Amino acid sequence: MIGYASRTGTRRNLDALRRAGWRLMVSAKGPLRTESFRYALDNGAWTAFQRGETFDAPAFDKAVTLLGPKADWIVLPDIVAGGLTSLRFSLDWLGALRNRPALRGARYLLAVQNGMEPRDIAALVGPETGIFVGGDTSWKLATMAMWARLAHEHGAICHVGRVNTVRRIRLCAAAGADSFDGSGVSRFASALPPLDLARRQPDIEGWLAGQRP
């Protein structure tokens, strides 16, 4: 799996992440710097939700203009735990973004939220529009394998947000997620080794299996 760490300006942590092969998740609500990493672009909705603020459309628009063309993918604006209201909000943005010449060929991730079902988004998912598993923690853990299956059936990727423990990384791997993001490794370099080992664990197990007679 690919690990994305929340953007940090701490040089020691950046060096550790670079050596481990992680990428950065740059938020529209933070400094718009990639630190020369490969990166994905988050819409900033989670930060706004935590602060009790409304979605900052101008900040997202600025971030997309500056960083969208080279991002691995862009998380479409969403409403945290907003169900089908969030889906309609995301689709309005998807239509607008696809009309921008500078973003031709960009990949987007549609954030699924509490209350959504596969039938609600199946017709939308494909190589250019993947799935970002949001929602609250219990819903995320209960449904992420279902979303990963749906994404892969349609040639899309599945990413899981807010993953900061070894257990959750292993659950993401078991669910078939392609990537995840978290902030723990950005704040504490000492948190990286066990989390990175968990990220690589499927590869290690595959290698060991190949060595057995």
Image (spheres, helix red, strand yellow):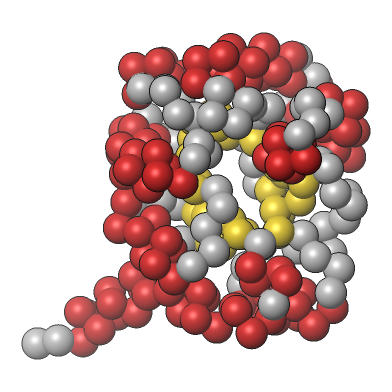
The answer to whether 122 appears left or right of 15 in the picture is left
72, 32: nearer the viewer: 32
Could you tell me which residue is drawn at 84 percent across and 78 percent down?
Answer: 11
Q: Say which quadrant the C terminus sits in.
A: bottom left
Looking at the image, residue 72 lies above or below residue 199: above
User: Which percent across, then down, holds residue 158?
Assistant: 45, 43
Could you tell me which residue is drawn at 45 percent across and 29 percent down?
Answer: 114
Could you tell me which residue is drawn at 34 percent across and 39 percent down?
Answer: 143
User: Which percent across, then down, holds residue 71?
Assistant: 72, 45
201, 167: nearer the viewer: 167
Res. 58 image quadrant? top right
Looking at the image, residue 41 lies above or below residue 56: below
Could you tell me which residue is drawn at 56 percent across and 53 percent down?
Answer: 162
98, 94: nearer the viewer: 94
The answer to whether 126 appears left or right of 89 in the picture is left
User: Which percent across, then down, holds residue 180?
Assistant: 52, 55
Whether residue 108 is visible here, answered yes or no, is no
Whether residue 96 is visible here, answered yes or no, is yes
Q: Residue furthest left?
A: 213
Res. 116 image quadrant? top left
User: Which percent across, then down, holds residue 87?
Assistant: 55, 18
